[in-house]
Image (tube, helix red, strand yellow):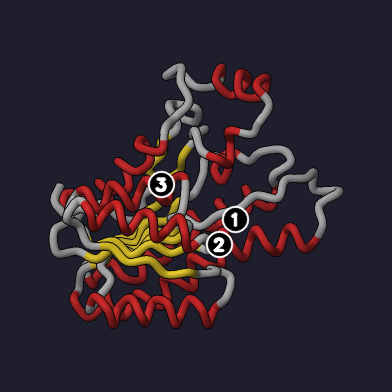
Amino acid sequence: MTLSGRVAFITGASQGIGYGCAGKLAEAGATVVVAARNQQKLQDFVARITASGGKAAAFSLDVTDEEQVKNVIKSAIAQFGKIDILVNNAGITHDQLVMRMKRADWDSVLSTNLTSAYLCTQQVIGSMLKQRWGRIINISSVFGQMGQAGQANYAASKAGLIGLTLAIAREVGSRGITCNAVAPGFIETAMTEGLPEDLKQVALKMIPLGRIGTVDDVANAVRFLASDEAGYITGHVLSVNGGMLMG
C-alpha cells in the first residue's frame, strides 16, 4: 500500500493514535504534515521521519481556533502544493455524569472532537476537489456507537463524527474523494493508561480477542483507508475494537 506522492495532514499528532497514524503514513511513503499544540513533540517526530529519508513538517495548531485552522492548512498547501489525505484525530475528554457536567466541559469536548473535523475538512476539500482524489478519515470511537456512562460529551462528539462522515461521503463521492471513519475500542494510549486497573480488567473481559488494542492496530486501519486499495470504500465505519462491539 504505497502512498508515495501523497501529502497527509494529521491533527492531534503529537502523541497516541495521531502520532501512530502519522508514522504509518510516512512509512508508506506519504509526505506527512503533523499538527497539534505541543510543538516540541511534533519537531521530534519530524526529525525522526526526515532522518529516515522521509518528508514531514510540523505546525502548532489549536483545532478549536478557526483562524488557526485556516492559516495552518493554507501554509501546508503552500509548502507542499496540496493535501491528499486528512486524518481528523484531535480529541479530548472531560468525563462527568451528565447531571453534573459543566457546560464548559461539554462545549470544549464537542469543539475539539467534532467541530474541528468540520473546520479542517472545509479547508482541505478545495485541494482534493481540484485533483479529484482525496481521503478523509475521521477517528471516532466505539463509545460513539454504544455510549458510555460519564462520557455524554465524548460519546456525542464521536457519534457526531460518524454522522459527519456519512454526509461528507455523499457530498464528495462523485469527485473521487472518500470519507470514512475508524472507531477504535479500548486502546493503549496516554488517555487510557491512567485508568484504574480494575476498570481495565472490566474492559478486557468485554473484548473477545482477549487483549487491549495498540496504536498500531488503529494506524494500520487508517493507512489502508488512505490507500488506493480502499478506493471503493466510502461512508464506512471501520471498527477496530477486538470484537468489543459487533454488528
Q: Which residue is mark 3?
A: 182
Where residue 223 appears, as percent x and y from the top left, is 27, 48
Q: Residue at x 42, y 51 (%)?
A: 18
In the visual, does 182 lie left or right of 101? left
The quadrant of the image that shows the C terminus is top left
Q: Which residue is mark 2?
A: 114
The amino acid sitting under disc 3 is: Val
In the visual, does 37 lie left or right of 236? right
Most distant residue in the right direction? 100
Dot 1 lies on which element?
helix
In the visual, does 92 lie left or right of 40? right
The amino acid sitting under disc 1 is: Ser
Q: Residues within 10 Å of mark 3 (few under 14, many from 20)?
A: many
The amino acid sitting under disc 2 is: Leu
Q: Residue at x 38, y 66 (%)?
A: 58
Q: What's the CA distance linking mark 2 and mark 3?
A: 14 Å
Where residue 85 appears, as percent x and y from the top left, is 29, 63
Question: Where is residue 76, by image quadrant?
Answer: bottom left
